[in-house]
Structures are given as C-alpha cells and as structure tokens.
Amino acid sequence: GGNREGRVRVEEIRKGERRVRRVWKVRGGVSEEENDWGRIGKDEVGRSLRGIRMGVSVEGGGSMKGEVGDDVEDRRQSFTRIMDLFWKLALPYWRSEPQARWDLGGVIVLTLLQSAMAVLFSYVGRDFWNALSAKDAEAFSHETVVFFLATVIGTPISVWYSFARERLALNWRKWLTERTIDEYFAARNYFTIESGGTIDNPDQRIAEDLKSFTSTSLQFILTLIVSGIDLVAFSVILFSIYPQLFLVLVVYSGVGTLSTVLIGRRLIGVNFLQLQKEADFRYSLVRLRENAESVAFYAGESREKKVIESRLELAILNFQEIIRWQRNLEFFTTGYRYVIQVLPALVVAPLYFNGKIELGVVSQSFSAFNHILNDLSIIINRFEQISAFSAGIDRLGEFVEYLETYSKEDISDSSSVSSDDTYTDLPVNEQQASFWKEGHTVAMDEEDERIEMCFNPNVALRIEKLTLMPPDGYDRRFVENLELSLTLGDRILIAGASGTGKSSLLRAIAGLWTRGSGRITRLPNRRVFFLPQRPYCTLGSLREQLLYPRSDQSRHKTMEDTELLKVLELVDLGKLPERMGGLDAVRDWSDILSLGEQQRIAFGRLLVNKPQMAVLDEASSALDLDSERRLYMELINSGVTICSVGHRPSLLNYHDLLLRLDGRGGWTVERVEQSVRESIVAQSI
C-alpha cells in the first residue's frame, strides 16, 4: 500500500514537471543571462519542479496556480500522512535488527525504573513536608536520609538511561543512514536527483535530517512511554487525593491541546520551507568554497556575495514567518503554563483550609498534577519541536519515497533490459540491473521512448537507429537514426561545433541519458572506462586516485608500488609522489593539482584499469600536444578501442574513424585518411 501511494505521488509530480517544462519550452528554453553555477534557465526549471513538491509558485511566491499549492500544504499538515511516513522510516530498523530490539528493551526497563523513582520521590517529598509541617525533628531526619538514599539509587539510573538512549539513537542513525546511502547510490539515483533537480539538497537530508530523525524519534517514543507510565501512576495518586482535581486536569489539558494544534498547525509548513532555505544558503557557501579560484580569477566577489545574501534573505524572511507563528502560539501556551501554577491550589485549597488534608498532601497533589499535566500536554509543551520534527519527516519521507519507488520499479522491470544475441552482462554489484529501467529518469515524459541498452563482450560498440534527445523534455534531437559499428581495436573521434551533442552521445553510450529510441550495444561496464570532460579527484591518497573507481585493491593485488610509479612516469607525474610524501599521502587533490595534472591522473587510471574500450570526453584539452601524443600512443599500443570527443585537429592523428555531428540530428561517418587529416589541419590553421 505504501509503495502504491508513493507511485501515485511520483506520477503527480511527473505531471507537474511536464507542465513546467512545457511552459519553459514556450518561453524559449534558455535565458540570455548567465548564472554563476550555470544557466539561469536550468535553475529556474529546477526551482519550479521543486515548487511542485513544496507548494511554491513558479514565479517565486505563494502557491502554485490552481490547487497544487493548497493540496501540498494540506497534505503536509496531515497528521495521518506524517504518521505514515514516520512508521515507514522507523519500523525497518526494529524489524530487521534483533539486537536493536534488545537495546530498546533495556532502555524501556531503565525508563520504567526512572518512573518508579519519580513515584518514590513523590512519596518521600510528601512525608518530608509533613514532617516539616508537624515540626517532627525525628521524622524529618529520617525522611532526609531516605531522600539521599533514593538520590544515590536514582542518579545512576538516570545517567545510564541517558547513555543507553543516546547509544541506541546512534546505532539507529548508522543503520538508517547506511541503508539510505545504499538506495542513493543504487541505480545511480544520485545522478538522476542531481540532473533532474526534483529533490533539493540530498546531502542535508542524509547527513542532518536522518540524524535529527533518529535522535528526536527515540526521544519522543521514550517520552510517550514515560508519559504513559506517569499518567497511570500519578493518576492513581491524584484520584485518591481528590477526584474533582483529576477531572479538572483532563478537561484543561484537552482544551489546551486542541487549541494549540489549531493555532500552530501552520508551523509544520514553514518549518519545512526553513529546512530547504537553510540548506540552499549553506549550499551557496559550499559552492563558493569549491570554486574559490575561478571566482577570484573573474573577480566575481560582488556577484557571489549578492547570490549568497539573497539566499540568506530568503532564509531570514521565512524564519520571521516562523517567529510570528511562534508568537501567536506562545500567547496561548504561556498563559496556559501560568495558570498551571495556581490551578491545583485553587481546587484543593478548601480541603486544606477545612483540615481534611495535610500540607504534604497538598505538595503531593501539586507534584502529581504537574506530572499528569505534562504527560497530557506533550503537544502543547513541544509543539514547536514537533512541527520542526514533522517538517524533517516530510523531507525525509519525500526523499525515501523517491528512492524507494524508483528502485522497486527498476528491480521489478528487469525484464525490460534486453540482451544481444545470447549474452547479457548485467552484474548487480555494478548497479546496472536497476538503472536502465522505465521510471528511473524523472524528467522523462511517459510517452517518450527509451534507448535500449545491451551488453556483449564481443562487440566494442554498435549503435542502431539511435535518436537521442535530452532528458529535460525538450524536443531537440542531437542525432537521428545514427548507425555506427566499432570492432575491438577501432578508434573513432566524435567532432562537431560546441553544443552539437558530442558529450550527450557519450552520456547515452554510458547509459546516463536514455531518452530517445534505438539500440546501443557495447562491452560490459567492467571492460569500459570513461574519462569525463571534467576530471574528478576522489577523497583519499594518491594511490587511491590511480586505482579509482575501485574501492579496494582486490583487483590490483599484484600491482606493486613500482608499477604505480611507472604509470605516473608515463603520464609525466613521476615526481609527484616525492613532492607529496609518497603514494599514500592524502591531500585535497582537486585543489592541489592543476587541470592538466588532473587529466594526467585520469589517464593514469585508465592505464591502471586496462579496459578494452576507453571513452574520452575532451580528456586531453589541458595537455600540451607532446603529452597528448605520448598518452594516446600508449593507448594505441595497448590495443584498446578508443572513442574520443575533441576539437583539436591533432586528435585526428590517433583515430581512424571520424563521426561528425551537425547539432540538428544530422551526422556523417568517414574513415580518416591522411588527406583528410591534412585538410582539417589546414582549415584549422
């Protein structure tokens, strides 16, 4: 049932996405103004798609036209939906981990002991005040000793309770975060989320929202348990003192809870928005840090400062809305708490004045009244906390629904991945089995066809009747009915003006873009190595840079340091280990290495992994011509199949096929003869 509801929600979001994209296409698709992180057009579409989930206007304020905004807001404030999401997130850990249930049982036992100590202190306090009122020194001394003995017993119980609760929350966070990360990486969901723009700030949802969810959830669950125990224990005490006081308490807390919910329910929605706006603000600061050198070269400090300040302003404005609603709520809750201080006395004072009860009983009635009222007033006392917690659950639920729905659809539709002839290589541990299926690319319209991916160890690359379109819903065709066949050892250069779809074709070959039609057959993933246009340095040592993307060295057990050093010599980085402190030196390589050095590292990875086919996207653009020649000759001598994208005429010397794209769907394939090389070089000169 939960998965079906998740699919319905995803379908609603898809419809909204298509509506936004149609509007965007009518507007022309691309804004003339440039943003610091890319075209404003792409960001506007991303914000609009997020707006569909958030209930925010495409124009930047209020709710979506029609009923989308109101529906989303009502859904966000729905107690039933929040509880459904809570149990969906919370239950798997306790069902699958027996040790977790034992740990929870231990915490509950400590909770019961804490409640028992609270009841004990209630009676000790009563007798203490009775002795004081009666001026009975002997009884007073006795109760003082009893009080300190109870303190000696109660202190370790309270400390161990806090320790066990925090440890259990930590274990729960670790388990839930690991499972969420598994889903995040499965089927390359991280790529789809980033390129689709439908889920904002997944890093915050994984790192912070999950942490808050586990600790706060456990705290609330245990609070409810304690409240239930206290409610029973102190209700007996209070009812035995004066039943009318108990009835007053029930009515008072009930009216208070209902009023608090009605006044403060809007806080859930604005807290949700605050989490997003704070994350957007932090993201702008992180982006500035990651691109500090580029911004400094452009002298773009003023522009970046405006971007950051604008996001800060949005966070401040929304927080002002939170403060206003908190003010309205506190007008009620503050008065509610003030009345509590005298309400028990107003009810039991006549009994005391008439001599029917002692002062200690009055004190005990105050204690019992406050215990029960706190138990019944959880929503009143913690509504602001609960509203923020509900907003976090909403964000997490939205994220998990997205991951879970697509992963389950992907796995269930595995038959849609066709094989070529009699062989298909789809190792699950390489995360292919769930990636190619229907429903994975959120940006795709339902009526769009999908490119069929096949894997064959005997075919380097075969493209049949390929029509490739971008995943963002545009009608543009990069290529139309493309036919291409490469045998093992062939070398092809993909050329064309900027924006004609060269890198897009490589994305289709990699399986990242699947919108279009036709079939692509190629070697299995483990036999193909892609070098993207923008070099990537992983977190870790220099050794790990060369072995990437493998997370361990199992495949390279026989690769000694001397072999890795030889690879570094081949890519003209022979002195790098000595300069940095050895192969196991850990640095921020993206900052330390120049773009050219990062491209050399990428070539080194390629030589270490020894694939059958290398796909290079402008992989030598930052290298000098001599270095480019030596690295390409090294690849040619190894017999690897090469598929390159580039603009340099010199690249023709290392390829025997040329695929030209005109950007309007047209294409030509020709064999590169010496005369062709000379003609192109002459034109470039």
Image (cartoon, rainbow, N blue to C red):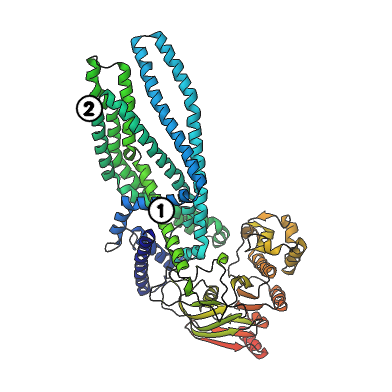
Give the answer, above or below, for where 482 lies relative to 178. below
Can you give x and y, in whole percent of width and height, for residue 479 in the image? 49, 82
What x and y, as percent, mark residue 488? 65, 81
Tag 2's secondary structure?
A: helix
Q: Secondary structure at mark 1?
A: helix
Location of residue 275 with respect to 220 vertically, above or below: below
Q: What's under tag 2, amino acid-wise?
A: Gln
Q: Earlier in the sequence, mark 1 or mark 2?
A: 1
Q: Quadrant of residue 235?
A: top left
Locate residue 561 relative to residue 219 in the image: left or right: right
Q: Is residue 10 left or right of residue 167?
A: left
In depth, the one of 267 and 460 nearer the eye is: 460
Q: Residues within 10 Å of mark 1 (few under 14, many from 20)?
A: some
Relative to 428, is 2 on the left or the right?
Answer: left
Q: In whole angstroms, how far apart are the C-alphas of marks 1 and 2?
A: 41 Å
Q: Could you tell me if the residues under marks 1 and 2 are in contact, i.e. CB atoms within 8 Å?
A: no
Residue count near mark 2 (Cα–Cα under 10 Å), binned few <14, some 14–19, many ≥20 = few
User: Which residue, given by chain and number where applicable, does mark 1 sit on?
Assistant: 88
Which residue is farthest right?
562
Residue drawn at x 60%, y 66% as measured from the top left = 535
Q: Which residue is painted at 37% across and 21% down in the image? A: 123
With 174 as the anchor, is 607 left or right in this view? right
In this view, 433 is above or below 141: below
Looking at the picture, which amino acid does disc 1 mark?
Lys
**Visible in this render: residue 342?**
no
Q: What x and y, as percent, mark residue 609?
A: 67, 68
Is residue 241 shown to the viewer in this render?
yes
Circle 2 sits on which residue?
244
Nearer-the-camera pick, 225 or 186: 225
